[in-house]
Image: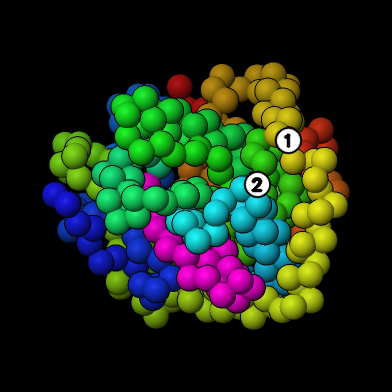
Amino acid sequence: MKYLPDKIGSYDQEDVLFLLRDISHLSIEKSTAEREESIQSGKAHYSEMLPVEYQPDAKYMRLYEEMLEKYARKVSLCVAVAAEKIIQVREINELVLVSLARAGTPIGILIKRYLQQAYGVNVPHYTVSIIRGRGIDETALHYILHHHPNASVQFVDGWTGKGAITKELEQSVARWNECGRPPLDAQLAVLADPGHCVKLFGTREDFLIPSACLNSTVSGLVSRTVLNEQLMDKEDFHGAKFYRELEQQDVSKAYIEAIALHFSPGLMKEAKQTVENEQDEQQPTWRGLQCIQEIQQRFQIKSIHHIKPGVGETTRVLLRRVPWKILVNPSAKQNLAHIYLLAEEHNVEIEYYDNMTYACCGLIKELT
C-alpha cells in the first residue's frame, strides 16, 4: 500500500480503525460567522475548513448524561435491529463494517459489539470519510479491499436527514464500480431513518441519539473530516484532527459501554421480533425529502442545503452553523431539552411546525 493511515482517535483499535490522515498540525479553524460566509458565498467548500470545536459547559453535560440514561436502552435496541437487518443481506463471515465519519463511528462500534455478543463473530470495522459534493475517500476503500479482498462491505451512519449522504454514497459507489474495481454495494445502514431513505435502519422515529448532542468528545476525539487540496495530498486519505487536548472531557468509550450494557438475550429476542414485524415497511419512500421541499416553499428558503432536518442535524446547526430558526414538531417537544438549551444560548427563535416526519429541523440563516 502506498498510503497507510495515521493512528488517530481515542477508541481501542479492536473497536475501529480510522482510515484518516492526522492533520492536527494544520490551522484551518474558522469562526462560525466567517465559515458560514465562505460557504454561502462559494469562496470555500465546507470540507476545506473546520469550525471551532464546541466545548459544552457543566449544565449541558448534565443534560447529556440525563439523555444517555433515558435513551440508552432504546439506542441499544435500534442497534440490534439494524444489525439483524444487516445480516439478512450480508454474509456474516465476510462482513466488513465501514462507518461514515464521524457520526457513523459509534454506531458501527455498537453494531460490531452486538454481532460479537449475539453471534460470536468479530467483524472488521473501519471509519472512512465521505463529503457531500466531493464523494467518498477512495484511498480508504482501496485499503479496505486490499486487506479484505472478499469483503461484503456494509456502510454505516448515525441517521438520515434529507438523504444527501445516502445519495452521495450511491453516486460514489457507482463511480467506483464503473472503473472495474471489486464491486461494492452502496446500501446504507443507520440507527435512525426519519428521512425514510434507506432500507436498513433501527427505527424511522426521529429521536435523540445521545451521541448527537456532542462533537468529538463522543466520537473518539476526532474532528469532522477535511479535504483541502491546497494543504493535503489529494491522493492521500481525507484528513481529520485528533483533539488529544480534550482527553479529560472524552466520553467516547463510556458512551459505547453505556449502550452495550443493554445487549441481553431479551433485547436480542425483541430485535429479531421487530425485524420480523417490519418486513413490509422496509422500502424507502423519501417522505422526509417531501417534507423538506414543503418547508423550503413555506419559508421561501433559496437553498435546500440550508434546511437541516432531524434531531442530529438540528444539533449540528446550533453547534457549528449560523441558525435562523428552529422548527419543532409539537409532538416531540418534551424530548428536545438540549435543543431548547442550545437555542436559548444562541438566542435562536423556535417555531412549532407539525407538517414533517422529523422531531425538529434547523434552518440556517441566509447571508446572501
Q: Identify the residue under disc 2.
A: 200
Image location (x, y in percent) of residue 106: 51, 63
Above or below residue 334? Residue 201 is above
- Distance between mark 2 and mark 1 Cα atoms: 9 Å
Q: Is residue 368 magenta?
A: no
On-image quarter of the C terminus: top left
Above or below residue 126? Residue 190 is above
Image location (x, y in percent) of residue 120: 56, 75
Name the residue at 80% across, 45% down: 279
Q: Identify the residue under disc 1.
A: 283
Image location (x, y in percent) of residue 99: 46, 54
Q: Which mark is residue 47?
A: none
Q: Which amino acid does label 2 sit on?
A: Leu
Which residue occupies the foreground of this view, 325 or 126?
126
- Residue 194 position by quadrant: top right
Marks 2 and 1, the one that precedes in the sequence: 2
Which residue occupies the foreground of this view, 45 or 227?
227
Instruction: Please give the count of numbered marks on the rendered protein.
Output: 2
Which residue occupies the foreground of this view, 34 or 74?
74
Whether residue 346 is visible here, answered yes or no, is no
Q: Give the range drawn in magenta.
A: 107-129
Name the residue at 57% across, 51% down: 90
Q: Is residue 118 magenta?
A: yes
